Image (cartoon, rainbow, N blue to C red):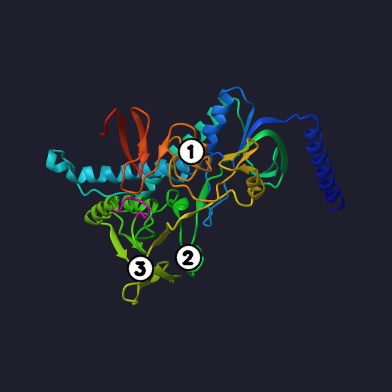
Amino acid sequence: MAVLCRGRHRWKNISSLRVWTRSLTGQYDYDLVVIGGGSGGLACSKEAAGLGLKVAVLDYVEPSVRGTKWGLGGTCVNVGCIPKKLMHQAALLGTAVKHARKYGWQISGPVYHDWATMAEAVQNHVKSLNWGHRVQLQDKKVTYLNMKGSLVDEHTVKGLTKAGKETVLTAKNIVIATGGRPKYPTNIPGAMEHGLTSDDIFWLKKSPGKTLVVGASYVALECAGFLTGVGLDTTVMVRSIALRGFDQQMAGLVTDYMEAYGTKFAWKCVPKRLDKLSSGALRVTWTDTQTGNEHEDTYDSVLWAVGCEELCRGRGSEWSMLHHHGDSVSTASVSCPPRKCQKSHLGVSCGVNRIPVPSCSSVSSPLELFLPAGHMLLLLFSNLRVLYNDLTFIFILRPTSVQVF
């Protein structure tokens, strides 16, 4: 034990000497260190390397409450856009098969869906993308480190491996692109012990069965949509309105279509507790906020889709925020902004992995004019494809009008 303590003390002394020496010489290990290997972090690192900079990326995935973990690529690749679209494709194929007989296709026997087969195919595809991202970083001469990064000072990052080994890196510039993770409600007994989130649903080996989706964000509705599509009994519990912050006329069309397609909705309801029965089923108790009455039902799975929390907290980001100057950020570091940004700056933000921009006024081009929900978003560029409320339009600027296709 004494030898171990002396070893740790010696490491700290060496690290302190290294940082002190670097501050005197002005020499760094890297031109840029990126903390986070999601969509934003990977794009940033590869682009910087393409411009001739020496770059390192630190990425580490903390297992979810249920123990789910994944590889390089962030939310979009592993537990977001990619697996979600593949599972929606599975649902669409099922619908096509159901109607195929009417169009002359001879299908013998009943058609049913096997979750395990789909899950294996989706997970194998995601793993191939993980490997692809590692190869791309290698091709771009970007150093990939499977470590959890945190800021020591404005030019120093500490990396921590799963085994607990610490490594100190110095860089002229540091970017924090850690994204976020789904959160559990803290005021509902049994929520964390028995529920799951979008971090888990795509990596389940067995079918979730009869599912209650709590929340009405786009994550909740997307998950409920493909669960219904593959033939599962699915209910969405909505506290107030669906797709808050989105155009409510469009939100109404979405939920009306989902109901017609088979998804059930429990409107104006708030879950109260979640209990696991001896049979393994989950008994959910909730309150109807309109009548005040209490109800309960049993489900095989409960999926919480009640928002996400940023991951830059606890990584030294409080220190880095001191380097904000008005509407700009010093080149020393970029940190999560104090507000949640739901707009897309200079491109489409994928899932929750994005490189934060403090404010629109710090973006010089293109000129962005954000109007109230339901109005047109004008980007003063010709033939520019943009994402607005998850719907894609092409805006072509004319001298006298804007044409929307």
Image coords of residue 339 (percent x, y): 51, 51
The span from disc 2 to disc 1 (Cα, nearest Å) is 29 Å
Q: Which residue was labeled with disc 2?
A: 191
The residue drawn where x is 30% and y is 29% is 396
N-terminal of the pair, mark 3 or mark 2, is: 2
| Amino acid found under the numbered disc labelled 1 | Lys
| Amino acid found under the numbered disc labelled 3 | Cys
Question: Are dots 2 and 1 in contact, CB under 8 Å?
Answer: no
Q: Which residues are magenta?
A: 243-248
Question: Are dots 3 and 2 in contact, CB under 8 Å?
Answer: no
Q: Can residue 283 be spotted in the picture?
A: no
Instruction: Please determine whether, in this image, residue 274 is positioned above or below residue 13.
Output: below
Q: Which residue was labeled with disc 1?
A: 127
Q: Nearer the viewer, residue 332 or 355?
A: 332
Q: Return the mark for residue 377.
A: none
Image coords of residue 30 (percent x, y): 68, 30
Secondary element under disc 2, as helix, strand or loop, is helix
Q: Residues within 10 Å of mark 1 (few under 14, many from 20)?
A: some
Foreground: disc 3 or disc 2: 3
Q: Return the mark for residue 269.
A: 3
Looking at the image, how many numbered discs can be counted on the residues?
A: 3
Q: Residues within 10 Å of mark 2 (few under 14, many from 20)?
A: many
